Each structure stands twice: as structure tokens, then as C-alpha cells.
Image (cartoon, grey):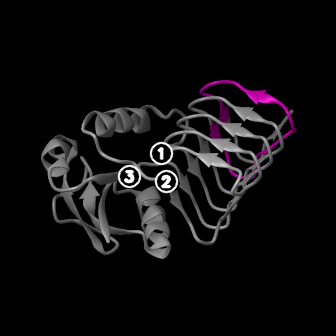
Amino acid sequence: MREIILVGGGGHCKSVIDVIELEGKFKIAGIIDNNLDIGYRVLDYEVIGRDEDLEKLRRKYEYAFITVGQIKLPNIRIRLFNLLKSLNFKLPVIVSPLAYVSKYTKIEEGTIIMHHSLVNTNAKVGKNCIINSKALIEHDAVIEDFCHISTSAVINGGVIVKRGSFIGSNAVTKEYIEIKENSFIKAGSLVK
């Protein structure tokens, strides 16, 4: 089984671990975190280094995944994505077996589709996105790079969510609208 390192050891990391374990495509080799001590355990996995160790770790590991969450701006996730790409890590797409993703959907590298999410026909999800638990991405929607569609959010048909946006839990969009770059949509909002 291919090994993968996770970058970020907080709450989102725990949720990603659960999805990776259930998906069964990768063995988690360890976690990278600048704020946790080496050897600290996140669930069953040890912190094995910090960002400055990634170059050395690349000699041993081919795959990495960003497990830092995103609320408000995606700056940390963008920095980590660029760092990992500069070191030639492969950033896979991770999809929970409990999610539904249409075969007519395009999902780009470094994105996670969490438990019970639904990504419908002809939707496009960009790089390094979080499609969180129970989110709905409807037909023909476009989620650009570095977006977080939070728990139980609904992105209706034909909506374009521009780069770096955060859509809060239980937010609902009207169909065929565009949400501007780096938007922050509060939980429970109706976006017209």
C-alpha cells in the first residue's frame, strides 16, 4: 500500500484520517505540524516532522496531503500546496466511500470529498479543496481552487464559487450565480 504523509495535525486532520482509513488506498506514515512536538500522536499517528523537514521526507515519501482546515482565507493551505508541489510531492484526490461523486465530475489534485457528500453530474472541483461532510455540489457547478464548502452546505446547479472562498455550514446558494474570489459566506446563509 502506498504511504502518505499528512500536513497539519489539528481537528481537520482527524476527519481526514477517518476518510483515508475508510478509503483504504493509502497507509498514513505520519503527520507534519509546526505546532506539535515530534512524537505527539494524532489519533493513531505520530508527528514526524515540521515544514522544514518536508524536503528530507520527500526522499522517502511520494505522497502528501494537506490536512490544515480552512476558515476565512486559504492562505496557509495555498502556501503548503505550493511548498509540496515545489518538492514534487503527489497530492491525490481523497474520496470517502460514503460519498457519491458522479463519473461525469472532474476533481483536481489535493481535494478531499468527505463522508456523505454528493458531487453531481458535470460539476468541477478545483485543486486543494475541502468538500466537507454532507455538502451538496449540484450539476454544472464549478468550485475553483482552494475553496472550502463546509458541512451540509448546498451549492446549487450552475453556481461558480471563485478561488479561495469559504462557504459556511448549512449555507444555500441560488442556482447559476457567481460567488466572488475569497468570499466568506456565513453558516446558514441564503446566497442570492
Q: Residue 80: say if magenta.
A: no
Amino acid residing under circle 3: Phe
Which residue is drawn at the image coordinates 76% and 46% (left, top)? 171
Question: Closer to the N terminus: mark 2 or mark 3?
Answer: 3
- Point 73% across, 51% down: residue: 153
* Quarter of the rendering containing residue 55: top left
Q: Tell me the residue that label 3 is attached to.
A: 65
Residue 85 is situated, as x and y percent measured from the top left of the image, at 33, 37
- Whether residues under marks 1 and 3 lie with C-beta atoms below 8 angstroms apart, the answer is no
Residue 172 lies left or right of residue 62; in this view the side is right
Q: Earlier in the sequence, mark 2 or mark 1?
A: 2
Q: Position of residue 15 (x, y in %)?
A: 48, 64
Q: Work out whether 43 lies above or below 126.
A: below
Identify residue for label 2: 93
What's the residue at 77%, 27% (across, down)?
Answer: 178
Point out residue 40 in the picture as x, y percentages from the top left corner: 22, 65
Q: Which residue is mark 1?
A: 109
State the residue in front, 31 or 111.
Answer: 111
Give the mark nearest the N terminus, 1 or 3.
3
Q: Which mark is residue 20?
A: none
Q: Quadrant of the N terminus?
A: bottom left
Q: Crowdedness of circle 1 by 10 Å Cα count: few (<14), some, many (20+)?
A: some
* Residue type, mark 1 in image: Glu
SS label for mark 1: loop
Q: Main secondary structure of the magenta part?
A: loop
| Above or below, 27 relative to 11 | below
What residue type is disc 2 on?
A: Val
> Which residue occupies the foreground of this view, 143 or 50?
143
> For the C terminus, which image quadrant?
top right
The magenta-colored residue range is 166-184
Q: Are marks 2 and 1 in contact (CB under 8 Å)?
A: yes
- As helix, strand or loop, the secondary structure at mark 3 comes to strand
